[in-house]
Amino acid sequence: QSALTQPASVSGSPGQSITISCTGTSSDVGNYNLVSWYQQHPGKAPQLIIYDVLKRPSGVSSRFSGSKSGNTASLTISGLQAEDEADYHCCSYAGSTTPWVFGGGTKLTVL
Amino acid sequence: EPQLVESGGGLVQPGGSLKLSCAASGFIFSNFDMNWVRQAPGKGLEWVSYISSTSRSIYYADSVKGRFIVSRDNAKNSLYLQVNSLRDEDTAVFYCATLAGNRDYWGQGTLVTVSS
């Protein structure tokens, strides 16, 4: 039950684009199109921004997009805004007996 | 609107126990598999436990297996987590969550602090 690997931190200036990677294995990310991404502001519960690798829930900005290649999923945020500064967590389905595995989280700083 | 509200957290000594609860409203709770997810201070999210909609299937993370027990009462729209033999490293905010794709619902969390 190893956690997915995310960079500890990323940063970007307003208006720029950033990408956060989430690397798993052939048993989780690589085997299922069930990767989700969450945004979490300090002291708040995680909020879903991407599910099923690339789908956006209603109400989530189109500036957020998801993709996957092999065992690595990615979250791209375009047109960075100050309000995007938060922690981002990836999550993947990992099979029936260990259904879910999360990444260690990535802190996004908007410079 | 779907809502999950956790309760039951608090300060407990190492080796102690607590029972966490999660009250659901605004959706058909009995149709959803449920999960407990925790977050230690300053750390990432960690999946803890899963229970299917009928309670037929139950799974735990290795870190809590044998110490935590998940259950649910669909008649009361409630999810529970009995946490036993608590260790310092169990200190965390515990969330209940559906983790069901677009039907993803989380509570606000309840803090469990293990300290002597």
Image (tube, coloured by chain):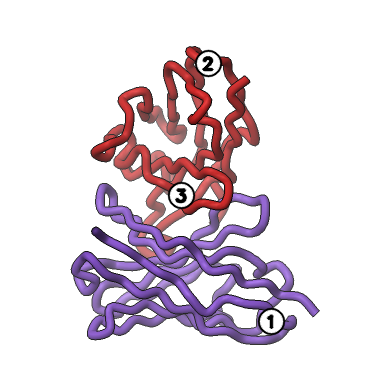
Residue B70 location (% of width, % of height): 43, 79
Would you call the spot at circle 2 few (<14 residues within 10 Å), some (14-19), or many (20 or more)? Answer: some
Q: Residue at x 37, y 44 (%)?
A: A48
Q: Are marks 1 and 3 in contact (CB under 8 Å)?
A: no
Side of A25 relative to B10 (left or right): left
Q: Secondary structure at mark 2?
A: loop
Q: Which mark is residue B12?
A: 1
- The residue that disc 3 covers is A46
Residue A25 visible within the image? no
Would you call the spot at circle 1 few (<14 residues within 10 Å), some (14-19), or many (20 or more)? Answer: some
Q: CA distance from mark 3 to mark 2?
A: 23 Å
Residue nearest the viewer, comparing A70 with B23: B23
**Which amino acid type is shown beneath numbered disc 2?**
Pro
Position of the N terminus of chain B, as image quadrant, is bottom left
- The residue that disc 2 covers is A14
Position of the C terminus of chain B, as image quadrant, is bottom right
Residue A100 location (% of width, % of height): 43, 56
